[in-house]
Amino acid sequence: MIIAIGGDHAGYILKEASKKWIIDAGHEVLDLGTCNGNPVDYPDFAAAVGHAIVEGQAERGIVVCGSGAGAAIAANKIRGIRAALAHETYTAHQAVEHDDVNVITMGERVIGVALAKEIVEAFLQAKFTGEERHVRRIGKIAKLEEEF
């Protein structure tokens, strides 16, 4: 799988660590920045990751900022992106299994490196179940996206 990854200055260290974990898990990384700790705006990187997925350059994405909240909000503005803030492993895998999430966001200022590694691993290993109830619910989300 190709994983697009991006983050702002407040997520730079965790973004860099996540790249290694993704590669170690046998996946490819599409690094969309930032490339240092200089102040930048998280919506730019959430958008870059989202567009990479929608345009078929990557299958999933990870965006890291200070809290993860702003990145999730920004990523979810892109049609076709289903992003979830994941600060523990249950959400990281359950959001994929039930909600077919294609992006997770994390907050470097909220979680530590060891937990972040487990979250990334859970996200990468998870697969959408395809159960009818989940497909139905995702269809309703897509309809909301079309209506508004």
Image (cartoon, rainbow, N blue to C red):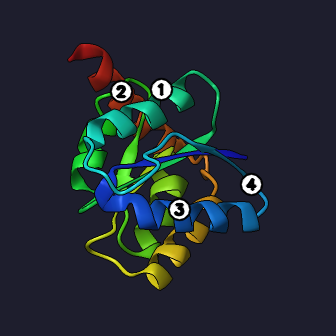
Q: Are marks 4 and 2 in contact (CB under 8 Å)?
A: no
Q: Which three-letter amino acid code belongs to the residue tagged 4? A: His
Q: CA distance from mark 2 to mark 3?
A: 24 Å
Q: Are marks 2 and 3 in contact (CB under 8 Å)?
A: no
Mark 3 or mark 1: which comes first in sequence? 3
Mark 1 or mark 4: which comes first in sequence? 4
Front residue of 62 and 101? 62
Q: Please give the residue where the numbered disc 4 appears in the rendered image.
A: 27
Q: CA distance from mark 1 to mark 4?
A: 19 Å
- Position of residue 43 in the picture relative to residue 46 (left or right): left
Q: Secondary structure at mark 3?
A: helix
Q: Secondary structure at mark 1?
A: helix
**What residue sits 44% from the left and 67% below the top?**
14
**What residue sits 29% from the left and 47% below the top?**
71
> Residue at the top extreme?
147
User: Percent position (x, y) of residue 36?
Assistant: 42, 53
Q: Which three-letter amino acid code belongs to the residue tagged 2? A: Ile
Q: Are marks 1 and 4 in contact (CB under 8 Å)?
A: no
User: Percent position (x, y) of residue 73?
Assistant: 24, 42
Observer-side mark, 1 or 2, equals 1
Label 1 Cα neighbours within 10 Å, binned few <14 / some 14-19 / many ≥20: some
Observer-side mark, 4 or 2, equals 4
Label 3 Cα neighbours within 10 Å, binned few <14 / some 14-19 / many ≥20: some
Q: Which mark is residue 78?
A: 2
Mark 4 or mark 2: which comes first in sequence? 4
Q: Which mark is residue 16?
A: 3
Label 4 Cα neighbours within 10 Å, binned few <14 / some 14-19 / many ≥20: some
Query: Which quadrant is the C terminus positioned in?
Result: top left
